[in-house]
Amino acid sequence: MKLTPGTTVTLRVKTVPMTAKGRKTIERLMRLNPKAQRTLDKVAKVRGRTTPLNQRGGRMWASRMAATKCVNCEAGATFPLRITPQIMPDVASVGRYIEIA
């Protein structure tokens, strides 16, 4: 797969990696999608406003909620990705599981 920095490509997941490391890398790349970023930002703002506070040891303690999972690594999933030099190693490490759509 030949990719050049500065281009935007649409990638498709051919097969789901068997290792958690590979799945997490693909999900991390999928979260770079602007649509996923907007969703994560909106949910993070709501989570910040609705975080329950309780007293613990004389101090206020925020019981943080779990992070939102808005992308899933599934076979056939497509996502646009702007290629930068920083993410080229990540794309290369999961290159056998993804292809240019």
Image (cartoon, rainbow, N blue to C red):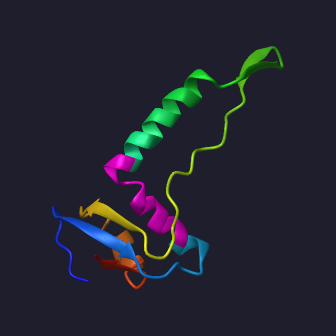
Q: Does residue 86 appear in this view?
A: no
Query: In the image, what residue occupies the spot 67% across and 34% down?
Result: 64
Q: Main secondary structure of the magenta part?
A: helix
> Residue reaching furthest front?
76
Task: Pick out the residue farthest to the right.
Answer: 57
Indicate the quadrant containing the C terminus: top left, top right, bottom left or bottom right.
bottom left
Residue 77's quadrant in the figure?
A: bottom left
Residue located 40% across and 85% down the image = 96
Using the image, determine if residue 48 lies above or below residue 80: above
Percent across and percent down for residue 80 are 29, 62
Task: Please tell me which residue is depicted at 38% across the width and 40% down the height of the picture.
Answer: 38
Expressed as whole percent of the image width and height from the top left, the position of residue 63 reads 72, 30
Number of callouts in the render? 0
Q: Residue furthest top?
A: 58
Q: Residue 33, image x and y in percent?
A: 34, 54
Q: Quadrant of the N terminus?
A: bottom left
Residue at 32% over, 71% down? 11
* x and y percentages locating residue 45 in the rendered image: 49, 28
21 on left or right of 58: left
Magenta span includes 34: yes
Q: Kindly tell me whether residue 14 is visible in this rendering.
A: yes
Q: Nearer the viewer, residue 46 or 92?
A: 46
Q: Nearer the viewer, residue 16 or 95?
A: 16
- Whether 90 is drawn above or below 97: the answer is above
Residue 58: image quadrant is top right
Q: Is residue 71 above or below residue 21?
A: above
Q: Report whether 68 appears left or right of 3.
A: right
Range drawn in magenta: 23-35
Q: Is residue 99 magenta?
A: no
Q: Is residue 37 left or right of residue 53?
A: left
Position of 80 compared to 68: left or right? left
